[in-house]
Amino acid sequence: MTDRYAVIGNPIAQSKSPILHTAFARQFGHDIHYGTLLATHETFADTVRRFVAEGGKGMNVTAPFKLDALEFADTLSERARSAQAINTLKFEPDGVHGDNTDGVGLVGDIQDRLGVALEGRRLLVIGAGGAARGILLPLLQAGPDYLLLVNRTEHKAHDLLGERRRAGKVEAGPLAAVAGGRFDVVINATSASLTGAHLPLADSVFAPGSLAYDLVYGDGDTAFMTDARALGAARVSDGLGMLVGQAAESYRLWRGSRPDVEPVMAMLR
Ligand code: ATR
């Protein structure tokens, strides 16, 4: 029998998730159907319930429903609780399990695909919105020597780190706190690239051999990627690999098989 999955969002027509999951299923010869669901905050819960009633096995959740899904889930993974946002629901006989695979997707992309180890390295995360929230715990679990989280609106960076702050190890500050620091991995978790806005990056920020990673992806380099190259980042990447990585982790969660992301990356490019 065909197992049903879907991604819910608004808008949703642009989502690459159906292509990704259909490609994963082909790798294993799994018989699945992966669709899209459009909802509003008012219809979110009913739409999900109807999908479950019709035999749905799992769902990806994208903007603007990552908080609605948090409310909806009966149980949460540690990383979903830490992120306070959900991108994956698994429908089980005893309830709805919520998870967040965004951070694992990012860490896997940096370490496995790009071959950049995070352990013992100096990390800079710029931005303290929804995108940053999902990646913080998995980044810290990768064992960096130091992590600095900066945000235009400083208090949001402090709020996000909360009890994870440790002097000299994990710190928060305003964008200006970057000055004088050198980082091995610089992650842009702001939405600035979506509007083509440039971040004020100090020219010393990229350590020799460093990686600049933009969570955003699109056609060609983002503003952040262009700036990072000019300022001496050895490597730059957009967030397409994270997108594929989070989808692969959702797939593994639902079906127990870990898809190969490389051929799917190649297909998307
Ligand atoms: P997302 O879910 O994409 O993270 P969000 O929750 O609205 O979206 O957060 C947007 C993030 O990008 C915030 O950290 C925001 O900074 P503020 O908290 O100060 O608003 C950051 N951001 C957006 N445009 C920016 C810009 N031009 N320069 C610096 N930071 C920017």
Image (tube, rainbow, N blue to C red):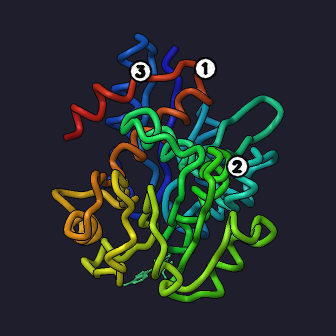
Residue type (three-letter) at the residue carrying disc 2? Arg
Residue type (three-letter) at the residue carrying disc 3? Ala
The answer to which of 234 and 266 lies nearer the viewer is 234
Residue at 40%, 10% in the rendered image:
29
Q: Where is residue 165 in the image (x, y as percent from the top left)?
A: 75, 69
C-alpha gap between disc 3 and disc 1: 12 Å
The answer to which of 231 and 193 lies nearer the viewer is 231
Q: Earlier in the sequence, mark 2 or mark 1?
A: 2
Residue 58 in the figure: left or right of residue 214: right
- Pick out the residue farthest to the top: 29
Query: In this figure, which residue is indicated by the disc labeled 2?
Result: 79
C-alpha gap between disc 2 and disc 1: 18 Å
Q: How crowded is mark 2: few (under 14 residues within 10 Å), some or many (20 or more)?
A: many
Q: Position of residue 125 (x, y in %)?
A: 51, 66
Q: Taking 94 as reference, is 139 above or below it?
A: below
Q: Position of residue 226 (x, y in %)?
A: 20, 67
Query: In this figure, which residue is indicated by the disc labeled 3?
Result: 25
* Res 60 label: none
Q: What element carries label 1?
A: loop
Q: Which of marks 3 and 1 is nearer the N terminus?
A: 3
Q: Taking 225 as reference, is 8 above or below it?
A: above
* Res 256 label: 1
